[in-house]
């Protein structure tokens, strides 16, 4: 009797060969298809169901759990972006929560009002600017003041503008920009030292140095290419030195005054 006239022996052998190529405990592809057909489910549907999270949404990654300090930092950064786009009056706590990717309840756990949140944003960026300035000053590289402000502005542009632009137009928060400007002007006074003896001229020079620094960096943020930041620092610093030299000794400019 000739075996396998109906192909059953050959089919059985073929299945054994397929099984031999798979690790023990795994089903061969043909078996998977058979099971899927029997159960009326496709592998694509199973994969989709497996990707669902506890809320029943598809493809959504679980929210990362953060410590209290990390969450507060996240909210402050998000708030700076939200306030920077729409301004203080037009931004709600819901807007901040959406920007941070959290619920409004979580925002209120850290800040009891929008005003408290806005003040915290201004306090944080003031401290960050101070920290970067002192670090750059310690390095002692030419242009450290410009580089310090630009470094922070590149990292957190909205927060820097909130402090140096928006807060100036909001009476209830003017104290923050006034404090930042006062601190920067005092440092400028110290750097001028005895180069300019006249007190009134020295005060004017210190105020003008700060205005030049802030205005030049903000203008560069609007128009400059980040790839050319170091070139900007050199040019801005060269201009500042030229101004300061002329203030100390107007005759050095060659112009008759």
Image: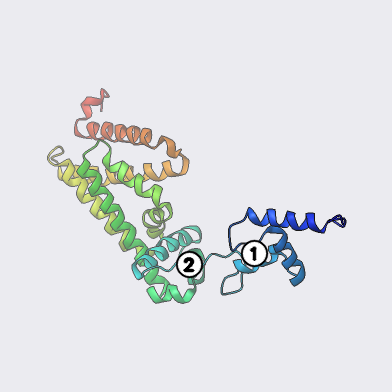
The number of numbered badges drawn on the structure is: 2
Q: Is residue 120 or residue 50 the one in the foreground? A: 50
Q: Position of residue 65 (x, y in %)?
A: 43, 69
Q: Which residue is mark 2?
A: 96
Q: Up-down: is 171 above or below 154? A: below
* Tag shown at residue 194: none
Mark yes or no: residue 111 visible: no
- Crowd tier of the residue under label 1, counting other residues whose Cα lies within 10 Å: few below 14, some 14–19, many 20 or above: few
Mark yes or no: residue 228 visible: yes
Q: Earlier in the sequence, mark 1 or mark 2?
A: 1
Element type at mark 2 = helix
- Crowd tier of the residue under label 2, counting other residues whose Cα lies within 10 Å: few below 14, some 14–19, many 20 or above: many
> In the shown orientation, is residue 36 left or right of residue 210?
right
Q: Up-down: is 127 above or below 249? A: below
> In the shown orientation, is residue 186 left or right of residue 17?
left
Rendered residue at 24%/31% (across/down):
246
Q: Position of residue 165 (x, y in %)?
A: 40, 54
Q: Which residue is mark 1?
A: 47
> In the shown orientation, is residue 76 left or right of residue 193?
right
Rendered residue at 19%/34% (across/down):
248
Q: Position of residue 21 (x, y in %)?
A: 63, 53
Q: Is residue 47 or residue 207 the one in the foreground? A: 47
In the rendered image, which quarter is residue 231 located in?
Answer: top left
Q: Position of residue 13 (x, y in %)?
A: 74, 55
Q: Looking at the image, is mark 1 or mark 2 nearer the viewer?
A: 1
Q: Quadrant of the C terminus?
A: top left
């Amino acid at each position: 009797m000739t075996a396998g006239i109906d192909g059953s022996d050959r089919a059985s052998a073929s299945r054994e060969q397929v099984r031999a190529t798979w690790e023990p405990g795994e089903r061969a592809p043909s078996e998977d298809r058979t099971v899927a057909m029997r159960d009326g489910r496709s592998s694509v549907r199973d994969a989709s169901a497996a990707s669902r999270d506890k809320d029943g949404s598809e493809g959504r990654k679980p929210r990362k759990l953060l410590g209290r300090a990390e969450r507060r930092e996240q909210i402050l950064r998000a708030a700076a972006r939200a306030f920077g786009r729409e301004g203080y009056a037009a931004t709600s706590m819901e807007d901040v929560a959406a920007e941070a990717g959290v619920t409004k309840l979580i925002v209120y756990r850290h800040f009891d009002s929008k005003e408290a949140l806005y003040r915290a944003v201004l306090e944080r960026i003031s401290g960050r600017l101070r920290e970067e300035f002192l670090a750059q000053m310690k390095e002692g590289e030419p242009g450290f003041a410009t580089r310090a402000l630009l470094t922070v502005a590149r990292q957190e542009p909205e927060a820097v503008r909130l402090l140096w632009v928006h807060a100036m137009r909001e009476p209830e928060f003017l104290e923050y920009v006034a404090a930042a400007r006062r601190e920067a002007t005092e440092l400028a006074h110290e750097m001028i030292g005895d180069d300019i003896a006249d007190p009134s001229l020295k005060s004017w020079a210190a105020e003008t140095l700060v205005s030049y620094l802030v205005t030049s960096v903000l203008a560069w943020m609007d128009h400059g290419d980040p790839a050319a930041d170091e070139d900007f620092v050199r040019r801005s610093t060269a201009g500042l030195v030229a101004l300061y030299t002329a203030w100390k000794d107007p005759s050095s400019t060659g112009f008759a005054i």
